[in-house]
Amino acid sequence: MRLDAHGQSARTPQETPKHMALTTLPVEFGSAKILANLSTAVLVEMALARGEGQLAANGALQCDTGERTGRSPDDKFLEDSPAIHNNINWGKVNQPVSPEHFEKLKAAALAHLATKAEIFRFDGYAGADPNYRLKVRVFTEKAWHSLFAKTLFINVPLAEKASFAADWTIINACGMKVTNPAEFGIKTHIGIVQSLEKKTVIIVGTEYAGEMKKSIFFAMNYDLPDMKVFPMHCSCNVDRKDASSVALFFGLSGTGKTTLSADPHRDLVGDDEHGWSDAGVFNIEGGCYAKCIKLSQEGEPAIWDAIRFGSVLENVVVDPITRVPDYDSAQKAENTRVTYPVSYIANSKIPSVALHPKNVVFLSADAFGVLPPVSKLTPEQAMYYFLNGYTSKLAGTEAGVKEPQPNFSPCFGGPFLPRAPMVYAEMLAERIKKYGANVWLLNTGWTGGPYGVGHRFKLAYTRAFVTGILDGSLAKATFVEHPIFGLQMPTAVAGVPSEVLNPRDTWSDKAAYDAKATDLAKRFRENDTKFKVSDVVRAAGPRVAVLV
């Protein structure tokens, strides 16, 4: 094996193992070899041989993502074309790029990949329900990115591979250096540029693997409503003994979707992305993408046990001698991650489909420290709080976020929504009414004060709230109304001290609490003016005047 100019291993064409599948070469990739649908073991071998990562003591492949250790939303663009223009909620999230710029960047990315000796290809599905799935083809220059795709998406059975024809294509040219971004209609040397009409994603300048995952979720958020399916940024699990006891957990990264859905007493359908059709709920993905910071075997045993050979650790510090991961370290990033197949969760549900949910939980990591830890929502409150999608951006989930920041993200997934938020909110309202689901707001953020003063709710308490929701006991509780937010707070929950149920009681300075709660309530009112909702829904929000 020879070494390249950087001292890393580089296979010559003669060194390519015979058992690796080679496909017909498209002209745009020049003489590069396309290694298609490699096994997990071969991809790990190649990633190690190419110097892309190291093997951790638990068998996982550990890789670093370089400059960007989180998503780059300011560098995400959408091709603007007549076919889709009127369907898109253009703005800060959906930034337009011209068809000419899109084609120019695509040509440059393909030319970059054509300089490589080898290119990796993965073919898979997005959508566990065959009636609503998309076929995805992923081209990457790194072996570990192909392993990521193989882990996150649903693998194609051997019998279907020969006839596989992609609906969507991802071209990941992460090593391409853009020196003249204006030439391609982007802002910096990084670009995640997507075309809904051409069903293509181009990624340049960033090695953060999550961009591939979220680009396909963005595609599903556009395509599924046309199929009368509600796309959701949520996790899902189901009672092992009662198939009708299905629960959804909505929330942005870091709010607890993965953690709370990994329940030893329930089967995991999926941890992040789902569709809700007339038949029930289905997972969009075939894997999980969990945060690792502060991970412990005691606190999250299911996730801990899922980190083994075939999993991919991102930006996790590994001891150079023992190769034992240090999950407490944020030396490389706060947003440390692990990717593993959903089947690595011992109690996963395969295929990843379920009936209609009985409980819908909105997760909010409140950095203000003023929301109740758990509240039962009326149908009008459900629509109001879903539209506003309040949480706090947590450190590391996006470039430049170093500490929690108050954030309103429509439908708990604003960065991934091509259409107007009302499209998704109305789909949620229709399904809640039709199937009679209970809706809850669960605060996984701070108590006893804001970020920097208070502390995050104990995971044990949050799990106790979830237990009460799922076993039906919390719905039978006695509730009192929060005077500012109008939320219904239980007066007692098994396993939780009563003094934490009303957030005002956890603050030593009551006047400071009132001021901070009023501040957040006013922010809700400022934000809700963006949406055209009925007077009844708007009245379900906090009890402060709308600021002019």
Image (cartoon, grey):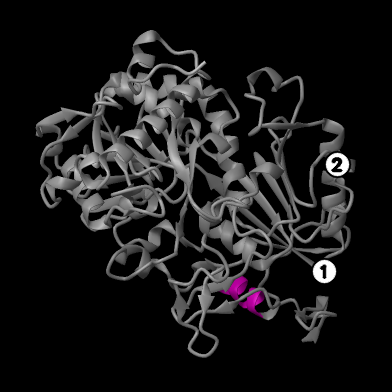
Query: Of helix, strand and loop, which mostly describes the magenta segment?
Result: helix
Q: Position of residue 202 (x, y in %)?
A: 74, 46
| Element at label 2 | helix
Say if 187 sits above or below 453 in the image: above
Residue for badge 2? 184
- In the rendered image, which quarter contains the N terminus? bottom right
The residue sitting at 34% across, 44% down in the picture is 369
Rendered residue at 64%/64% (across/down): 65
**Residue placed furthest toward the bottom:** 321
Hey, which residue is sitting farthest top in the picture?
A: 535
Is residue 157 visible in the rendered image? The answer is no
- Residue 195 seen in the current view: yes
Residue type marked 2: Phe
Q: Nearer the viewer, residue 506 or 280?
A: 506
Give the distance between the C-alpha atoms of the residues marked 1 and 2, in whole angstroms. 26 Å
Residue position for label 1? 117
- In the image, residue 498 sits, relative to residue 290, either above or below, namely above
x and y, in percent, of residue 324 in the image = 46, 82
Q: Residues within 10 Å of mark 2 (few under 14, many from 20)?
A: many
Q: Which mark is residue 362?
A: none
Looking at the picture, how far across and down is residue 373, in whole percent?
Answer: 26, 42
- 83 left or right of 389 in image: right
* Relative to 101, 232 lies left or right: left
Residue type pointed to by label 1: Ala
